[in-house]
Image (cartoon, rainbow, N blue to C red):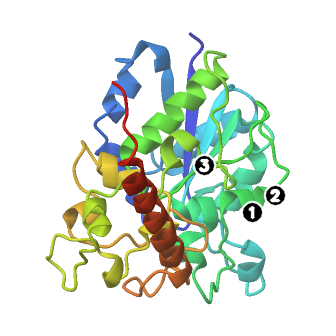
Amino acid sequence: MQPINVIWLQGQGCTGDTVALISAENPSLVDVITGVLPEVSGINIAFHPTIMAPWGEKALGPLEAAKEGKLDPFVVVLEGAVPDEKIAQKTGGYFCGIGDMHGKIVTVTEVLNDLKGKAAAMVAIGTCAAYGGIAAGKPNPTGAMGLGAFLGKDYKSTLGLPVINVPGCPTPGDSTLKALAYLVLVARGAAAVPAMDEFNRPKFLYGELAHHICPRAGYLAEGKFSHHFGEPYCMGLLGCKGPIAYCRVPKYGFSGGFGGCPSTGSPCIGCTEPGFPDAPFSPFLKKSPVKSWVVEGILDNIGKVKATASRFHKRSI
């Protein structure tokens, strides 16, 4: 199969998504790179500032090659937010440099502009890359934004795809690799474009509310809430944002089936959602908006009444 190159750029971020990527297990990064999975073999990480061996100007060679069309087809992955360099230029500086070429700083903004019209897909990994995230939190002095906002709502890659958002703070490595593997299949004509939600998140990764798949959900149905950290019940009174956040971690864990906020005693803080970390997702331990709980309570009671009423009708088996 035709090799597909991956150009992984890092904007304003903490590299947490890369750390999570390295810890992925199903599949692992090694599985993908070495071609253990035949359907997604032939993936070459042409550029990744954290894990690649080259340094200096030589390290930026793949970016020049991609710009010249020598790495087609390639997928651009962004980790971290995109700053508004015009703000920094007012004082003669820059916000996010990724290297220097011929004595000149190369910014992530320049590279994105160079490659946006040539990439088979543009993928935002992590909430900072998807929506601005922590870097864009108020007062946002650098004008940080997500990749989609930077490229514009009408952007389409050479495959006709919008920016694909795979948010999280950080995004589980398993989710990152599943999303990239799926896009490789799309690029090779072996799979249809995945169904997306309104925020361009693949539904197979972000189709369920954290609240609905939480391992503590059964306690909510019984009306049992944790009032102190360390208690095993629903964490709605301790600031859980599960009712307003779409995330698969409560059910599938963070890595290898383990970890995840409610599984390890922390309320969900809604890190996969646009607007994070500002309100209504902060303060992190503030209760989520009352509307979500009112709707939850109404639907819960309606469901219980219907279930109870159905007990009076005999069913033939």
- Residue 13 numbered tag: none
Label 3 with label 2: CB-CB less than 8 Å:
no
Q: Quadrant of residue 175?
A: top left
Residue 286 in percent (x, y) is at: 41, 87
Label 1 with label 2: CB-CB less than 8 Å:
yes
**SS assignment at label 2:** loop
Residue 200 in percent (x, y) is at: 67, 50
Lower position in the chain sequence, tag 1 or tag 3: 1
Amino acid marked by disc 1: Ala
Q: Nearer the viewer, residue 121 or 253?
A: 253
The reply, left or right, for residue 147 in relation to residue 218 is right
Residue under the image location 61 percent in, 20 percent down: 191
Q: Characterize the local packing of mark 1: few (<14), some (14-19) or many (20 or more) Cα atoms within 10 angstroms.
A: some
Amino acid marked by disc 2: Gly
| Residue at the spot of label 2 | 152
- Distance from disc 3 to disc 2, alpha carbons, whole Å, reads 16 Å
Q: Characterize the local packing of mark 3: few (<14), some (14-19) or many (20 or more) Cα atoms within 10 angstroms.
A: many
Image quadrant in which the C terminus is located: top left
| Residue at the spot of label 3 | 201
- Distance from disc 1 to disc 2, alpha carbons, whole Å, reads 5 Å
Residue under the image location 31 percent in, 41 percent down: 24
3 vs 2, front mark: 3
Amino acid marked by disc 3: Arg
| Residue at the spot of label 1 | 149
Q: Characterize the local packing of mark 2: few (<14), some (14-19) or many (20 or more) Cα atoms within 10 angstroms.
A: few
